[in-house]
Amino acid sequence: MGIDDLSASATPASKRECPSPAAVASPGTESKYKVVVKPRECFDVSKLSNRLLQSAFDTCLNTTAFQGFSIHHPTNSVSVWVRSLADVDRLTHLQTLPVTADCTVQVQAYLSSGSDLRRYVVSGVDPGESPEGLITALTCSTHKIVTARYMGRGRTCLVTLQGPRTPPSRITYYGCILKFHVYKPGVVHCYRCFRTGHMRDSCPQPADTSMESVETRTYKCGLCQTDDHEITSKDCPVKQKALKARRQRKRRQRSVTQEERDADIPTSNRFELLSPSEEDTPALVEPENACYEVPTYSDAVKRGKKRVQQPANTPKLSVTGTDDLAKLDQQIQQLQMEVKRLAQRRTHLARPAGPTAMRGTDVPYAASVPELSCASASAPVKMTPAELLHFVARQLQELSKDSLLVHKETLRRSTRALIPPRGSDLPGGLTRREEVALRRIRVGAALTPAIRATWTSGAQPPPTTCPFCVAPATEATLDHLLGTCPGLHQARTRHLRGLHHHPGRPPDLTRWTHGPLHRQLLAFIQETKLFLFI
């Protein structure tokens, strides 16, 4: 290819507004040089006759039926491809081209590019030299200088070199080494027709074009591809639809977040049990036959340290009747049972016990604590839910700080006694995920879909089926996922081969989960992504 192709590859795409004529019509591999013929006056070369052009080129090049030229409309020029520099010299002497049989147009021809030609911009030459003087004064050891011309009126010239594709080592001018760089042609603008590719002197349009008469491009919105509104306007229907969807999405997110917050916040205060007259708890109504009065929590807080020193264990008695006496007998029996239970607890705490025996004694003691019955067998009247709540709150008020600590310790021990072993015999070399999964499987604390199906509150709805088969979620237990799920049959059979498992028999999960071949179990969980449901 020629210099135009080399310079076009180094020019950004935004500046290559005018494509090269060589890219439009390639003459073939035989032609090496391209000569551009341009009119010296305002004339449209597309009006030239191809027959007359061929005749003119045959006369200039001494050929017959010349082939190798094309008309380039953006640049308003004729590109001619020849094989040698001698033909280039003949074409540069071309002065006119026939328009009709008796009319011609003045033209100029110059060498544009060639397969072995490169153009460079050389800075530092003396001004006022002729083109022949520049060619004589400029020397290069690796390339041949073909043409040279000034670029404007300064000390810069455009030099065309013939030789290898590699840049020359240096270019000298009367023995002075000058700086040079590859020529990158820019975009040529015409100030007559306001187009690119040619200049005003060779414009095909004879008259100047005013800016008012030029049709401006209609800009359209990039979203809806219409021009009925401004590009940055908010009236775009596509933008309005996107904004509406965004508002709806934010509204849904806020509602979901508020529901999660409401699920975490308790809906009632435990101190409201002592204040039945509050508007928030209309269901808790003071019974009509109450024989004692309890101060509300708000009243107790308002009084503070200046409250009346009234014994809490001696409630204010009102007028009593037969039903009130029966209720008092019932409460006396309950208090006696509470005293008996506290005596048993004190006996248990006073018993000497080491740290190793503490865990074993938690379960029998927790089982021996009698439950607080709501009504005695001999009591003729049962307590209503409101009366029961008031009674429990009354008992909590009467308990001392030491008794509350004993209650907390008992609850902590009984709860800890219910926790199964943690699986301290886990093998080493496990990752955090593998260790947690294996411990949950051995302990039996896996969060399977069967357990999640019992959850009624949460941001996500509970599962309805097994994630690997069509079984209901209530049946998707740990034994189902590891042993009997049909959706995992192939993977389970492949991983159970190391246990010498018979395909027709159910797998021994205890041997698989607690045996030495736990690595196959972990590989099975990792392959089937069971860790998401354990």
Image (spheres, rainbow, N blue to C red):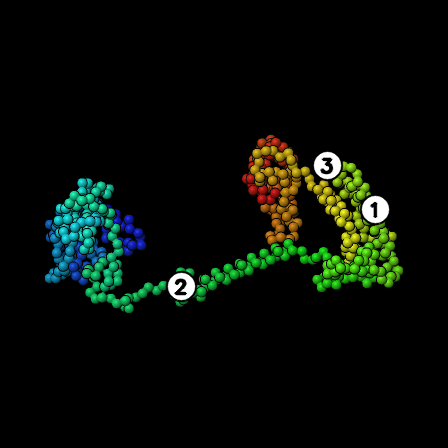
Which residue position holds label 3? Answer: 355
In percent of width and height, residue 235 lies at: 44, 66
Tell me how far mark 2 sits from mark 1, CA to CA: 85 Å
Mark 2 crowdedness (10 Å alpha carbons): few <14, some 14-19, many ≥20: some
What residue sits 40% from the left and 60% below the top? 222
Looking at the rendered structure, the secondary structure element under dot 2 is loop
Residue 392: in sight, yes or no? Answer: no
Q: In the rendered structure, find residue 231 and report the number of the disc placed on it.
A: 2
The residues bearing labels 3 and 1 have C-alpha atoms spaced at a distance of 27 Å
| Type of amino acid under label 3 | Pro
Asked if 470 appears above or below 253 in the picture, the reply is above
**Circles 2 and 1 in contact, beta carbons < 8 Å:** no
* Mark 1 neighbour density, 10 Å: few (under 14) some (14–19) many (20 or more): some
Q: Residue 448: x percent and y percent?
A: 63, 44
Residue nearer the viewer, 171 or 42: 171
The residue at the point 84 percent across, 54 percent down is: 331
Q: In this view, does 502 lie above or below 13?
A: above
Q: Position of residue 158 (x, y in %)?
A: 20, 50
Q: In which quarter of the image is residue 295?
A: bottom right
- Sequence-wise, the earlier of marks 2 and 1 is 2
Distance CA(mark 2)–CA(mark 3): 79 Å
Q: Is residue 525 left or right of residue 163?
A: right
Contact check, label 3 and label 1, Cβ < 8 Å: no
Q: Which mark is residue 72?
A: none
Q: What element carries label 3?
A: loop
Residue that numbered label 1 is attached to: 340
Q: Is disc 3 surrounded by few (<14), some (14 to 19) or many (20+) residues within 10 Å?
A: few
| Residue 502 percent across, percent down from the top left | 61, 33
Give the residue type at disc 2.
Answer: Ile
**Is residue 227 something that shows in the picture?**
yes
Residue located at (82% from left, 55% from top): 313
Q: Which of marks 2 and 3 is in front?
A: 3
